Image (cartoon, rainbow, N blue to C red):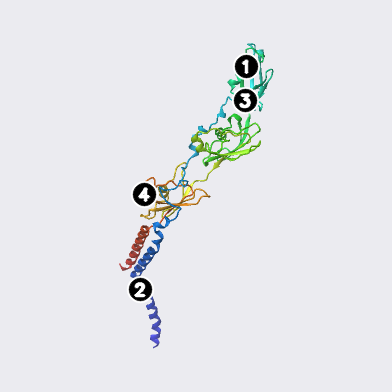
Amino acid sequence: MDEHRQRTPGLVASERSRSSRDSRSPAARLQFSVRFVYWAICAAIPLLSPGCASLNDNHYYAGQIPGGYDAPPNANPLTIDFAQLSGTATDSDVIAKGDVVNVEIAASVSAKDIFSYSVRVRDDGQADLPLIGPVPMAGISLADADATLTQYCVARNIFRAPKVNVTIRRRKTNRILVVGAVKEPGVKEIPVAESDLLSILFHAGGLADDAGANIEIRNVLTRDETMNEAIAADGSRGGIKQTGYSSSNFAPRSVKIDLVSAAQSGSNDYFVGDRGVVVVEKTEPKAVTVTGLVRKPGRVEFRKGEDLRLVDAISQSGYTSSQVANKVYVIRQPTPESRSIVIQASLSKASHDPAHNIRLAPGDIVKVEHTPATILLEAAQFIRVGVSSSLNPLF
């Protein structure tokens, strides 16, 4: 009896060990794998019905995106034709208010009859010349100034046949602050006649690599200054948008300029006055986020000045992690004020039809979705692995 009692615990432990091995037998493991896959498919297929999302009014298909939700081209301001932005005020021989001009008048062939002196052009555009009096000079070329001064000398009986030579000794300059995405930001002293946008960017070393297409000009007016035709526009022409306006003297006025649109339209009258400020937009690298059935989910950045298409973004993410993955959702919200939309696309169609290989916009979320086909493929792979591991102990 005592021996039977001593052996009983060992027999119980042996039975438990045998039962545990039976529960993990190859057949049991295979049965568990099949059941798991079956219930996973049953639970997932209703959620993946392609007709569910199409019931929403913010769901669209590639090739049928409504206006206002299309991705804009990824323009590069560094490649635009800046010559279109050169203003008419850049003529180097035009006299401006505040310039100091040098006047030489030869009354005869004798050297002692040559008169030379420097005068400043007043804010009313005239220059007070000794013996001659006030002469209008602002806004005319040096050649026209020679002819005008000659006429005044003869008309006022000062000289009979003078030879006049007018040159610019010193230009009046505007102090303009340039900030943002330029290579040499800071305060620039630029001649009034050269204070157009292109010259200002040149004095600031040009656009930096991270420059955007938008530039804001904050121009401070004097009593005698009037807004340039482009700046006084209603904001709809030439890629400019007026952001502030006041009719009082010395009132700051602000405009926003789209460099790409301005260059394409040929608008070139962007003049900045004294104490003006030019702000060049600085941009962060543009990118989209790719998630779902891809090998390398994460950010995909735009190349400078190049569009990013759907197939390109997925390719840069290592392409799909499932051989049969095909359905893609693109979630887009053009502006913080607008609502987001969902664009459904097909990878197979996007690979062959440019209309379905949609252009992506910065901030888009691209998600490669599960479908019944991808789940069945994963289930088949799961069963194959389960069967292989189950049969290995038998051999």
* Residue type beneath disc 4: Lys
Mark 3 Cα within 10 Å, few/some/many (few <14, many 20+)? Answer: many
What residue sits right under mark 4 in the picture? 349
Choose top left, top right, bottom left or bottom right for residue 11.
bottom left
Distance between mark 1 and mark 2 Cα atoms: 120 Å
Where residue 267 appears, as percent x and y from the top left, is 52, 34
Q: Considering the image in quadrants, where does the C terminus appear?
A: bottom left
Where residue 15 appears, as percent x and y from the top left, is 37, 78
* Residue type beneath disc 1: Gln
Distance between mark 2 and mark 3 Cα atoms: 105 Å
As drawn, is 193 to the left or to the right of 23? right
What residue sits right under mark 2 in the picture? 22
Q: Is residue 377 visible?
A: yes
Any mark on residue 151, and which? Answer: 1
* Residue type beneath disc 3: Ala
Choose top left, top right, bottom left or bottom right for residue 174.
top right
As drawn, is 322 to the left or to the right of 112? left
* Residue type beneath disc 2: Asp
Callout 4–callout 3 Cβ contact below 8 Å: no
What residue sits right under mark 3 in the picture? 138
Callout 1–callout 3 Cβ contact below 8 Å: no
